Amino acid sequence: MEQRRLGDRGVGAIGFGAMSFGGMFGPTDEATSLACLDAAADAGISHVDTANIYGMGVSEQVIGRWGGRRDIHLATKCGIVDGPPRSVRNDEPYIRQCLEDSLRRLKRDHVDLYYIHRRQPDIPVEDLAGTMGRLVQEGKIGGYGLSEIAPSTLRRAHAEHPVTAVQNEFSLWTRLPQLGLIQACRDLGVAFVAFSPLGRGMFGRAALRRDFRAGIDFRDTNPRFTEPNFSANLAAVAPFRDFCAARGWTVPGAALAWVLAQGDHVIPIPGTRTADHLRDWQGADPSAADIAEIERILPAGFAHGDRYGDHQVAFVERYC
């Protein structure tokens, strides 16, 4: 697999997001998750991303049991405090305690990349960067990142202590980072890690059915997955599916290839619960003309509905 820079290390251009190991999209089990991680490593994926809130530690525990098998670049996150109501904390004592808890679950004495999952607005980002810089200096983390932030926040944090990566949602139907954030990352030498690059399943192997489990799968109340938006989005994506089929590409492979084409500092981190879906992530090699045609079929802003509902959008920085 092609290598891209993440901090001081090269990693596979496609990473792995382990949110689903915590049951966020439906039931899973440890044996299936471990097999999925093995398949990811066999496919050349060397960067694994998780968070303390994914299954309230379950995802980290699974990776901790698996981690000794492979040499991987590992990222985790803190900052979201489970509710109700959900809130955020970025104070140094809280960050340090969360890190120690994550390291225990991950069975590590340090983590390669540590993100602040959401920014606490009343703590200056310079203070937050100072906290993360001290953790780097102490050898607890290899570098730090920020998630769902604006370009201005990145620049302020980076001036205090260099940022390793920014992780925001980015895909064919979520294009906001192209309005300044991807460019800011490029200019500063910061990796841009794209989460949900397959649109939470909208760009999966087969067209989605609306059978999300209420109270378990958060798509059940997400505006893009509720009617009438859901049917409108399926119809909008259908020509892209036909385009991929005509070229012998999988839909996930083509969607990821489009994300990768947006900059050599962009690293998508698709996720899955099973090893079976991993084979769909590679194999598409679109030309510049193909990329242009994909953007004609799915122009910026084509999606029906917001990417988050009002109950999900708290502490996401908006800048456009």
Image: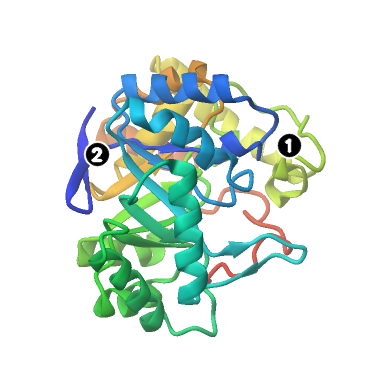
Residue 293, compared with residue 284, is above or below; it is: below
Q: Secondary structure at mark 1?
A: helix
* Residue 214 vertical placement versus 205 (above, below): below
Mark 1 or 2: in front is 2
Pointer 2 local density, CA inside 10 Å: few below 14, some 14–19, many at least 20: many
Check residue 11 in the rendering and tell me which mark sits there, or answer none.
2
Identify which residue, 12 or 84, lies in the foreground: 84
- Residue at the disc numbered 1: 231
Q: Position of residue 56 (x, y in %)?
A: 63, 48
**Dot placed on the residue nearer the N-terminal end, 1 or 2:** 2
Residue 239 horizontal side relative to residue 41, left or right: right
- Can residue 243 be seen at all in this image of the molecule? no
- Inspect the image, locate mark 2, and give the three-letter code of the amino acid beneath it: Val
Coordinates of residue 228 in the picture (x, y in percent):
79, 44
**Quadrant of residue 42 in the image?**
top left
Residue 231 in the image: x percent, y percent?
Answer: 73, 36
